[in-house]
Image (tube, coloured by chain):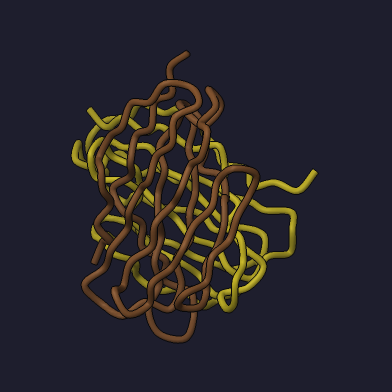
Amino acid sequence: QQPVQSPQAVILREGEDAVINCSSSKALYSVHWYRQKHGEAPVFLMILLKGGEQKGHDKISASFNEKKQQSSLYLTASQLSYSGTYFCGTSKGGSNYKLTFGKGTLLTVNP
Amino acid sequence: EAQVTQNPRYLITVTGKKLTVTCSQNMNHEYMSWYRQDPGLGLRQIYYSMNVEVTDKGDVPEGYKVSRKEKRNFPLILESPSPNQTSLYFCASRISAYGANVLTFGAGSRLTVL
């Protein structure tokens, strides 16, 4: 069962902030975030394993609310290079062997 | 260079003509997986393999077969392709099926079935 991502698409001006949400109807073991630039393969951003865990990478950070079964990706002071489609992947149970991705959020950053 | 290599990158074929998309990784990863990507549907898992000779269905396995005879290779077989299998296919691998491990994706194979 695919996690639900919102919004489906967002357009920003350089320097603006964005939040991408990922939610599931089932209990989650982990949440994975990947970014795919146009015409390229998805590339890893971060993994969150525990409820309440937050991580950051440059000006991109994420949180995982285990109780609400959701994760949010925060992009701060967006740069042109942030443009792409963001996917969250979720796994259930005690392992990550079946990773199910959402439909993606298309982020466009304009000058 | 650590990588996942898929071939062919582009293929146009006709309905019913068997084809194989190869996937090879040079990182000694235990876990490998195939995804298909379609507009508006995101990445959907077709099959995955936790190790040699251990494979299992993902969310959309119908019409596909896989095998894992060697650790480095995980081919995707379409025995009788149909137009609804026109898609962009990604192979991915990671060091283990367990724990917080990063998926490394191949460059993708764009398949068109006429």
Question: In the image, B82: left or right of A66?
Answer: left
Residue reaching furthest bottom?
A: A94
Residue A83 screen position, x and y as percent = 46, 28
Residue at point 40% right, 84% down? A93
Q: Quadrant of the N terminus of chain A?
A: bottom left
In the displayed structure, would residue B43 be above or below residue B97?
A: above
Residue in front for this viewpoint, B110 or A104 = A104
Quadrant hosting residue A84: top left
Residue reaching furthest top?
A: A111
Residue at point 41% right, 28% down? B11
Residue reaching furthest right?
A: B1
Residue B57 screen position, x and y as percent = 34, 70
Residue in front for this viewpoint, B99 or A68 = A68
Residue in front for this viewpoint, B19 or A36 = A36
Chain letter tied to brown: A
Residue at point 38% right, 72% down? A65
In the displayed structure, would residue B95 be above or below residue B13?
A: below
Q: Colour of chain B?
A: yellow
Residue in front for this viewpoint, B83 or B1 = B1
Quadrant hosting residue A72: bottom left
Residue A57 screen position, x and y as percent = 63, 50
Question: In the image, B23: left or right of B109?
Answer: right
Does residue B106 appear in this view? Answer: yes
Does residue B61 appear in this view? Answer: no
Residue at point 51% right, 50% down? B91
In the displayed structure, would residue A104 be above or below residue A17?
A: below
